Amino acid sequence: MTKPITVELGERSYDVHIGASLLDTAGERIASLVGKTARGRPLPVVTDTNVAALHYPRLAKSLEKAGLSPAPIVLPAGEQTKSFAYLEQLIDALLALETERGGLILAFGGGVIGDLVGFAAGVLKRGIAFAQLPTTLLAQVDSSVGGKTAINTARGKNLVGVFHQPRIVLADIGTLGTLPKRELLGGYAEVAKYGLLGDADFFSWLEQHGTAALSGDEQAMTHAVSHSVAMKAAIVVRDEREQGDRALLNLGHTFGHALEAATTYSDLTHGEAVALGCVLAFKLSARLGLCPQQDVARVAAHLDKAGFRTQLADVCGPPSPDVLLSFMHQDKKTKAGRLTFILARGIGKAFISNDVEEEEVLKLLEDEDE
Ligand SMILES: NC(=O)c1ccc[n+]([C@@H]2O[C@H](COP(=O)([O-])OP(=O)(O)OC[C@H]3O[C@@H](n4cnc5c(N)ncnc54)[C@H](O)[C@@H]3O)[C@@H](O)[C@H]2O)c1
Ligand SMILES: [Zn+2]
């Protein structure tokens, strides 16, 4: 276990704890956050069917030991749970438990549970405190920190949500041991992204130890998660509501979202699309004369070694340059018709750009297509 990382947001500040057996001591930490009046009442623990079967008994034991009365609310696993229908079902279950303003709601699972529960907590009775207990690598390094919550609609992902910061984040690295390999790899794309966007030393460390972290070395994984969270926390503190710097976290995502959409969310996971998107963002930067070619080669080599597809030709289809460009325009991050790209002057030196000529993007994708 490492020192907790504090996300410094004034009265909304909170600690992120990262370590190998945190679930066993979660009870005490949670109990200290539950108001006196709420102590004897049921404590809602929202989770999905997979996480419930694998990890709920350990969490429940720890909560009970601390004098709390966990009340599990188990939802189906999968992205379709981030919907109005399940929001309604969840809110009804929380109201049935008579969840009050002084209470606390636990989100125990991956980013789907974290986003849905965070949103429900943000709007129920105009805001109830919640805790994030992330159990996927993606949720530990990305979605559980920063207070963005959302559900999807038929017109697009994450279109309905609020900013609602958690009161605490408890990331138990041990839970990653049961995560399917492809899910683990997907989260690793976001880990590598932090090195690529702002920390060349961390990227070098990943070149040395990344595969160990992915193969179950808990010490290496704890370092990778802690460093990622510290970087995300620093960016969120600078720009909580994404008016500037927070957009750096979208490195690889302009291409990534288009790749996911163009392959109808079936061939690539989000992380796989982001990994390929990072390679494309570095290639684009090199074409524009901003980034040395050898950095592009290092990015591609590392992501390839980790197990990602790093060329457009490897994608099923593969989608044509025009199709990809039209999906980029549909992404909600376009400003007044201009595409936003996160470019880099080298590994660890990313910046936000609104003035990339589409011609350059098309040429890059056409060359990739050959
Ligand atoms: N709020 C944010 O800032 C933010 C940032 C990035 C992504 N997101 C959102 O996060 C979501 C994706 O999160 P995700 O990748 O964690 O997906 P997920 O929550 O669907 O989890 C992936 C799968 O792993 C299973 N699982 C979870 N923990 C497990 C464990 N320890 N062992 C075995 N299986 C386990 C889940 O049941 C699910 O089947 C997306 O909806 C995305 O929009 C939000
Ligand atoms: Zn992402």
Image (tube, rainbow, N blue to C red):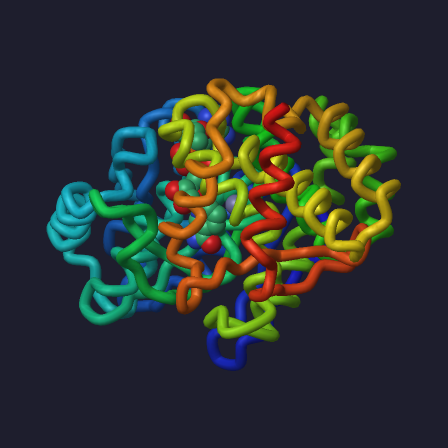
Instruction: In this rendered view, identify the residue nearer to me: 192 or 154.
Output: 154
- Quarter of the rendered image showing ligand 1: top left
- In the rendered structure, the answer to whether residue 91 lies left or right of residue 338 reads left
Q: Is residue 179 above or below residue 253?
A: above
Q: Is residue 271 visible?
A: yes
Instruction: In this rendered view, identify the residue nearer to me: 291 or 323.
Output: 323
Instruction: In this rendered view, identify the residue nearer to me: 127 or 149.
Output: 149
Horizontal and vertical percent for residue 15?
Answer: 58, 63
Horizontal and vertical percent for residue 23?
Answer: 53, 40
| Residue at (49, 43) in percent of width and height | 134
Horizontal and vertical percent for residue 295?
Answer: 84, 44
Q: From this viewpoint, which residue is outermost toward the bottom?
A: 10
Horizontal and vertical percent for residue 21?
Answer: 61, 37
| Residue at (38, 62) in percent of width and height | 34
Instruction: In this rendered view, identify the residue nearer to me: 60 or 246.
Output: 246
| Residue at (28, 49) in percent of width and height | 151
Q: Is residue 64 visible?
A: no
- Quadrant of res 245: bottom right
